[in-house]
Amino acid sequence: MYYCSMNLQIVSAIGALWMFMACNDNAQNQSENNTMNRQDTVAEHASHYTQVNGIRMYYEIYGKGKPLVLLHGGGSTIHTTFGRIIPALAENRQLIAVELQGHGHSSDRDAGFTFEQDADDVAALLKELKIGKVDVFGFSNGGTTALQLAIRHPDMVNRVIAASALFKRSGASPQFWEFMNQARIEHMPAQYKDEYRKVAPDPERLQVMHDKCAKRMAEFTDISDELISSVKAPVLLMNGDADVASTEHMAAMCKLIPHCQLAIFPGGHGKYIGEITTLTGDAAFRPYVVPVIEEFLDAAPAK
């Protein structure tokens, strides 16, 4: 599967760090209009906490059916990443939406953020829930974590959707990496700061969370071709045609994964799933990607 708009765009380096962590450069201007309109975007759910590898991890459960785990972007929460698409996804599936180390409601540990540790934390949660193999949908940093989950815990993963994720440094522009050392909390979208302060166990740790996110990206290390090629689960890579990761990067990664499909949608980082910073004013969002997601998840097992 390859859906591609021909009008590819170059992502600006200014604000690129927080774009990858699940935002775009309209974020600051749209805070008042887009700050989590929970009544309109979030379905009925149950909230839970559990102890996982030394942290108190928060997760929400929606709907009924085959489980689909949701992994948010860096610096974000369940609702800033997936709030606009959860109601549609929950119509046919049980969603297990997780907040990772130091994000949202979940507590932190005295260690930096890594994709490998996040994957291990999600695996520990799934073992605690005793639900067997699951499908996983991760966005941005959550997409990289989803791939690490398939690499490190293949017996727990059925199918993987990795959306707007980055797997190698060459996948983003040189300007993106030059910007890493200039990351400042002032660049962080107001929506993210507001949401963190609302739900975090210690709202005063916002700066800590920001700095750990920035450090993880500044020190980003490639996932080797060998590890990427070792993923046996079917994978759907999704990306915007004006995203942080290039279309060429996603196509190259898809060729390395034995059972992989690629979908490219118009727009920037997360616009196609209605990520909170990508919507302007009262613009309505129609989750047009949901049929693509459901077709992939419901496909016959790969041979």
Image (cartoon, rainbow, N blue to C red):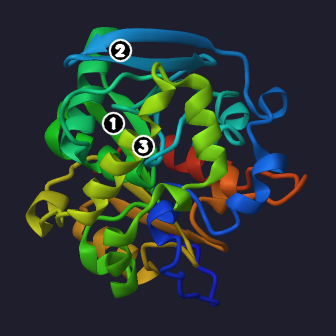
Q: Quick one: which residue is furthest to the left in this view?
A: 226
Residue 94 placement (x, y as % from top left): 55, 22
- Whether tag 1 and tag 3 are in contact, CB under 8 A, the answer is no
Any part of residue 274 in sight: no
Residue 140 placement (x, y as % from top left): 44, 55
Any part of residue 186 in sight: yes
Left or right, 207 with respect to 37, comes to: left
Q: Vertical placement of 141 versus 62: above or below?
A: below
Q: CA distance from mark 1 to mark 3?
A: 36 Å
Q: Vertical placement of 49 versus 27: above or below?
A: above
Mark 1 element type: strand
Residue type beneath disc 1: Asn
| Residue picked out by circle 3 | 207
Residue 218 placement (x, y as % from top left): 26, 65
| Residue picked out by circle 2 | 131
Mark 3 element type: helix
Residue type beneath disc 2: Ile
Residue at x 44%, y 61% (from the top left corner): 184
Mark 2 element type: loop
Left or right, 212 with respect to 176, comes to: left
Q: Vertical placement of 201 versus 3: above or below?
A: above
Q: CA distance from mark 3 to mark 2?
A: 35 Å
Determine which of the numbered discs, if any, sits on residue 158 in the image. 1
Q: Which tag, 1 or 3, sits closer to the chain's start?
A: 1
Q: Vertical placement of 275 versus 59: above or below?
A: below
Residue at x 29%, y 35% (from the top left corner): 157
Q: Which tag, 3 or 2, sits closer to the chain's start?
A: 2
Q: CA distance from mark 2 to mark 1?
A: 12 Å
Instruction: Say which quarter of the image contains residue 43.
Output: top right
Q: Which tag, 2 or 1, sits closer to the chain's start?
A: 2
Instruction: Say which quarter of the image contains residue 187.
Output: bottom right
